[in-house]
Amino acid sequence: MSEVAARQSGDGAALVLDGYGTVLACTPGVVALLGARFTELIGRPFADFLSAGSSRGMLPRDGRAMLRRSGGPAVKVRLMVLPLGGGLEAQSLVWAVPEAVAADQEQDQALVRALSGQTEIGLVLHDPDLRIVRSSHPPGAVCPPADAGAGLPGAALDEVLVPQDAAAVEKQLRQVAQTGVPVTDQVLRARYRTAPEQERVISLSALRLEDRDGRSTGVAVLFRDVTERHQAQRRQTLVEGAEKLLLGSLDIVATAEGLASVLVPEYGDLAAIDLAEAALLGEEPGDLSLAAPLRRAAVAGSWPAELLPVGALVRVRDPEHEPVYQRHAVAVPDLSELRAALADDAEGSRQVLPDAATSLLMMPLRARGRRLGAAVLWRCGTRARFDQDDATLGAQVGARAAISLDNARRYTRERRTAEILQRSLLPQADVQVSAAEATGTYVPAGTATGIGGTWFDVIPLSSCRVAFVVGDVLGHGVEAAAAMGRLRTAVQTLSDMDLPPEELLAHLDDLVTRLSQAERAASAPSAGHRVGSVLGSTCVYAVYDPVTGLCAIASAGHPPPVLSAPGQSACFAQVKPGPPLGVGGLPFESMELAMEPGTLLAFYTDKLLAHRQDGTEERLRQLRDQVQAAAREDRSAKQTGHVVLRHLLPQAPEQEVALLIARLYALPRGAIAAWEFPADPEAVSRARYAVTTQLAVWQMEELAFTTELLVSELVTNSIRYAGGPVGLRLIRDKTLICEISDPSQTQPRLRRALVTDEGGRGLFLVAQLAQRWGSRYTSHGKTIWAEQQLPVH
């Protein structure tokens, strides 16, 4: 109860005593303290209210005392007696404060004295207008410059701190004054106006001061100087940021941009990353010289117009003497000498001297003995200028960042090598033949791991036929590109044999099996799987005949093409894919489809269907719809390819993609003439007559003699060795094609006849008369064909 009474009495009570210690007057606090009415207090000696043990006398003395409380236990108080003069009846004023309140006041005063006297924490009291009322300036880390301490009481923050820092601190304090919500350990910059170049960071805590009625009387601020800790953390952050570049993108430009973002704004206000052009291309960079300029690869900060922008050339006139391109990190805290030296050099000024810059730091970027370029930083305004400590830190950051840049450079070289090899092994993009108009597109991946084994080909065959091929080799990089080249060469060689699609894939499967066995035998047991092996490759092979309008398609683990005939809905060819090459299993099967003139065929690799958001089914639908729209709008193959890729690949793919679009045509009916003859020697003369008559209709009499000889020899051989019926067909295209078909599966063989031989010179004569000749198997036997150049009119 005594404690409650003490708290209820507030900060204390006052009594006025006469010379005999009689109470003449008192404050309401005495009533609350003693639990008595005014009538019971006035006129009584103050000694009557003192408990036993307290000093007795007419007038009390300073010190502790026990006051008797009406109807309750005594209350511990502290008395302070003030004598009164002036001849009045009142002789003394007694101030009685409960012991608990007095102890609290002593602790508060002790706390203020401790805060004011210690050396680690600063204390500043602000009035409601945030002007400084009182401050402690301990002689330790938080001590301001000597000339900043004068006149602090009554000063505004912007009169003590630089404007930028004052605004940040004032914003925090005003929020505390308005809301009453304290701020704890807020890290802010606090540089003095008299020494703006000195970096200073404080940890600030603030709380609102209030009177008894809850009205704001100001703000109390406690702060610690954490400049050294902050600088250490910043140094660690910069070094770690440079090291993290090793885990980021392996694109050298993206790495340069990452380095610039690490440096600004933490370490400087502006930053430029200048790299040797050879390094940007993945090549070995040489020494900086006039012949090997740098290129500004990345910038950071509010880039000024007077500086060279991204992509500009930065020429180094004398790298051994220019202060900004030394072998070691160089800090230039004062730019006045550099400005004077470059006063007449506009190009040099645009490289290194922004108008607002006050200091400069150059960090050479060297890795594995190679000079890749340099990182240049500037500080502006009132920010602390670069010094030797910054140069030491810059050397560490530059060394770590250079390793990341060199890794990206080497990666770029590998990617460019793989892409160049890949493109060199691919055929020309646009192919125009009588049977089709085709456009192949190769889209490299954004990374070297996505480049390697994707390919396409358009192969003209005999008798105006054409083959379309799209394939994909497992693996990536140069090895996969080389494996793709081997596979494409094998397909071209096999296609020259005019094999049906399923037989070609069977031969290719055997070849892949042998090659993969040879690869395993040549590899060390611990080498594991080689990247870029032909084993497991996929391939789709299609042969289109513009004479019959038939297209035969076979697949080895590859997705089927999309076909869209005029006036019909696009669909996927119902081809049953066989196993990937070299895997074994089921045999390959081909499907023969009748194609209308103008039909679009779209061959693609399965990587075109890979997408992070869209599933495979959705991508297939999009591909089918794009091909159908192209067929409906009668777009060219090239336009169709561009539209499909623009829709399905708005950004660089993670894996390389190949797309082959072909629009099929049919030969005019008037360009084909066909006959069938029995196995009768007299049929030879009839065949010659039919040919000469047709050539006269086509106005090609110049070719009549050689064509008669070719037909005579080939028809005679078929009748003699194969039997009938014998088919004869002439095709007028860019060349004159003569075909002889018979039921025999025996391929003709060219040999040199001896002088004593009576025959055996027919095929030799054919080879001499024809521009090209050959033979192919058919479902009913074989066909021998020969081509002649058309006469020039």
Image (spheres, rainbow, N blue to C red):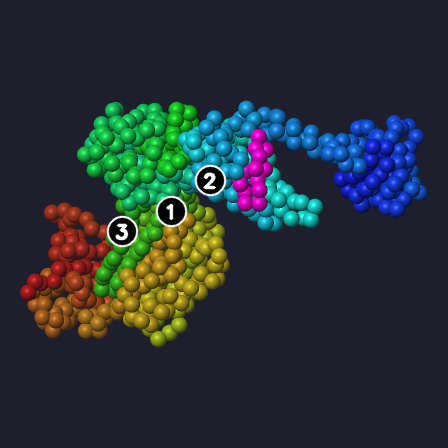
Residue 427 marker: 3
The residue lying toward the viewer, choosing from 282 and 263, is 263
**Residue 70 visible, this orientation:** yes
Query: Toward which corner of the image does residue 311 lie, by quadrant?
Result: top left
- Which residue, given by chain and number where applicable, does mark 1 sit on? 446
As drawn, which residue projects farthest toward the front? 87
Q: Earlier in the sequence, mark 2 or mark 1?
A: 2
Whether residue 129 appears in magenta in the rendering, the answer is: yes
Does 659 lie within the magenta span?
A: no
Local crowd at mark 3 within 10 Å, few (<14), some, or many (≥20)?
Answer: some
Secondary structure under tag 1 reads loop
Image location of residue 79, percent across then percent down: 80, 32
Which residue matches tag 2?
158
For marks 3 and 1, the one nearer the N-term is 3
Answer above or below: position of 422 versus 225.
below
Q: Can residue 182 be seen?
A: no
Q: Say what amino acid the circle numbered 2 marks.
A: Asp
Residue under the image location 39 percent in, 64 percent down: 562
User: Residue at coordinates 28% horizontally, 27% vertically from top-left?
Assistant: 323
Residue 621 to residue 155: above or below: below
Decide: few, some or many residues near mark 2? Use Cα within 10 Å; few <14, some 14-19, many ≥20: some
* Kind of residue at badge 1: Gly
Question: How many discs appear?
Answer: 3
Rounded to the nearest angstrom, the CA distance separating label 2 from label 3 is 72 Å
Closest to the observer: 327 or 366? 327
Picture quadrant of residue 440: bottom left
Tell me residue 452's x, y (percent): 37, 45
- What are the residue bounds of the magenta stretch? 123-136
Where does the image place residue 541, in percent across and percent down from the top left? 35, 57
Residue 81 is left or right of residue 629, and the answer is right
